[in-house]
Image (cartoon, rainbow, N blue to C red):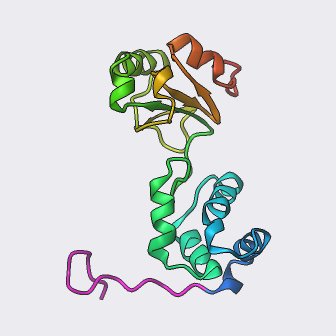
Amino acid sequence: MAQAWGTLHPPTPQPVSAAACPDIATLCARHGGRADAVIEVLLDLQHAKGCVSDADVAAVALALNLSRAEVHGVRSFYTDLTPEPVAHRRIRLCRAEACQSVGAERLRVALEVRLGTAIDQAGPDAEVALETVYCLGNCALGPGVMVGDRLVGRATVDRVLAALPAGEDGDP
């Protein structure tokens, strides 16, 4: 009988073998099998699969001789790494204090209206995901927004939509 979290005996993680994940083992080997390459390995996985699942975390930990907690810590720290697939077109809006002071919340509202989606509510099938991040390291040019892999400083709705690649229907 399975026990729920919060009990004295949490579920035991299933063992993972390198043979069960040869693509991850190969990917880790391409980065020299070094533990300090964990971020590069996880980013490659994210780009290849669209996410870094819990099973991927376990397989990378095994291949790089790290604990699952260490790999999970890296995955959960970086907003580029997601445990489930996300929309292909992502807009990440900085909502930290510096960007708030120069209009990030007004921009959020305007983007929600223009895109027809609420921030942090899009699923993997969404056309566009509007997501919160806290600091893009571009405080002097706030509000800061990442559109895909492109940083947009002094962001406005028009600048963000201009940086957004066209969707399947041709609209931003």
- Our reading of the magenta stretch's main secondary structure is loop
Report the side of 93 relative to 36 (left or right): left
Q: Find out whether residue 145 is within the magenta segment.
A: no
In the displayed structure, 72 sits above or below 85; it is below
Q: Residue at x 54, y 36 (%)?
A: 126
The percent coordinates of residue 33 (x first, y second) are 71, 76
Q: Residue at x 62, y 34 (%)?
A: 148
Q: Which residues are magenta?
A: 1-16
The residue lying toward the viewer, choosing from 124 and 45, is: 45
**The C terminus is located in which quarter?**
top right
Q: Residue at x 68, y 74 (%)?
A: 34
Report the side of 18 relative to 61 (left or right): right
In the displayed structure, 70 sits above or below 93; it is below
Q: Residue at x 57, y 77 (%)?
A: 61
Give the image quarter of residue 125.
top right
The percent coordinates of residue 144 (x first, y second) are 49, 26
**The N terminus is located in which quarter?**
bottom left
The percent coordinates of residue 68 (x first, y second) are 48, 76
Q: Which residue is most to the top?
A: 158
The residue lying toward the viewer, choosing from 26 and 117, is: 26
In the displayed structure, 74 sits above or below 97; it is below
Q: How many marks?
A: 0
The percent coordinates of residue 52 (x first, y second) are 57, 61
Report the side of 21 relative to 107 (left or right): right
Q: Which residue is most to the left?
A: 7
